[in-house]
Image (tube, rainbow, N blue to C red):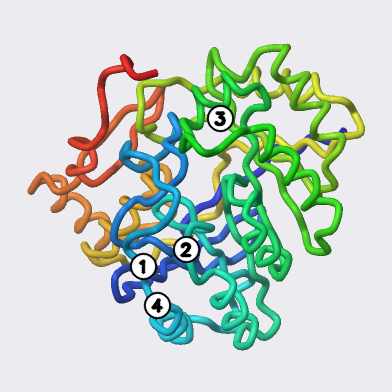
Amino acid sequence: MFLLRMQSTSYKSAIVSAKNNIIFGPVNSRRFGMSLGIDLSPSSKQCNFDCLYCELAPSATVDKQTEVISVDAIIHELTKHLNDKIDVVTLTANGEPTLYPYLDELIDAINKIKDKTKTLILTNSASLVDEKVFTSLLKLDEVKLSLDAISSNIFKKIDRPHPSIKIENVVQKVIEFSQIYRGKLFIEILFVHGLNDTKEEIQKLDEVLHKIKCQRVDIGTIDRPPAYPVMGISYKELHDIALSFDADLPIHIASRVHAEPNNVYHTKEEILNTLDKRPLTIDDINLLFDKKSKENLNNLLTCNKVAIKKVGNLEFYIPAENLKRKRTSNKEL
């Protein structure tokens, strides 16, 4: 096993203001490099999970997208912002990107124009049970699969999946995918206090991870405002969990560390779009925003378009309307 305290994704370039917010970034990630994001559900959250820790507002799960953007629209926006400084084009969504019905066609279209840029998808793994999705993801250069739990009861509590999803089927497909995939595969596990951080569940994860061929297993915890009133675990607890996995597994601890400053200008619209997709702390702001951008942020705070939400010892700037969408009761947990 090898441990590495990793730098989490940070916003180091001006956020692109694209039609319907399809394109966002570039984002500089220690894990994946300079990434240009494609949001396959820019207008609303469409997901087959309703995870406790999600940064987006809680919502009912779905098994397909009802609001769909065309491949042509995505490619049109992508070509405006794709350049040789982009290391990776990242497929993500306000929800689950593999629910996008034209995913296969989109991947083919991106592969035709991306040149040396890599392609990456961030997925919760559940759609791998769909053979078309399974085959489509094989065309990508990099894939990150989430796997938070193995036990059915814990999986249902943390990830709150669509009723059609069974964790045993997902696990089997993750294993199968890893055996034939020729790109770089990453597994991500997010630990929630009191749920999947038990010795029993970690042991089950350990057993399954030994059947998965991957580049790296990133373990982390909640460090941004979650949809539900749940807690993360400490860095020490993450470190102890990392040590509890077998030494032959490529375990990495994903945690916050400071990046070098990259102070650039952001309009009010860009700030709101950024905070909607990824809440920022004051440290993030100091690293990313120039003086004028900070003035724009203060104006947004003054007019109540941006609010501050405390999570543990950290305070995050988020769109004020997002506060209203967060649930405050844990009666559904």
Instruction: Work out how far the residue at label 3 is from the one at label 2, CA to CA, in angstroms.
Output: 27 Å
Q: Residues within 10 Å of mark 2 (few under 14, many from 20)?
A: many
Instruction: Work out how far the residue at label 1 is from the one at label 4, CA to CA, in angstroms.
Output: 7 Å
Q: Secondary structure at mark 4?
A: loop
Q: Residues within 10 Å of mark 3 (few under 14, many from 20)?
A: many
Instruction: Please state which of residues 232 and 299 is positioned toward the viewer in this rendering.
Output: 232
Residue 148 sits above or below residue 74 on the image: above
Instruction: Work out how far the residue at label 2 is from the one at label 4, CA to CA, in angstroms.
Output: 10 Å
Q: Residue furthest left?
A: 303
Mark with earlier residue (3, 2): 2
Q: Which dot marks residue 221? A: 3
Mark with earlier residue (3, 4): 4
**Which residue, given by chain and number where applicable, does mark 4 sit on?**
70
CB contact under 8 Å: marks 1 and 2: yes
CB contact under 8 Å: marks 1 and 3: no
Q: Which dot marks residue 295? A: none
Answer with left or right where residue 173 lies relative to residue 30.
right
Could you tell me the amino acid type at mark 3? Thr
Q: Position of residue 280 (x, y in %)?
A: 38, 45
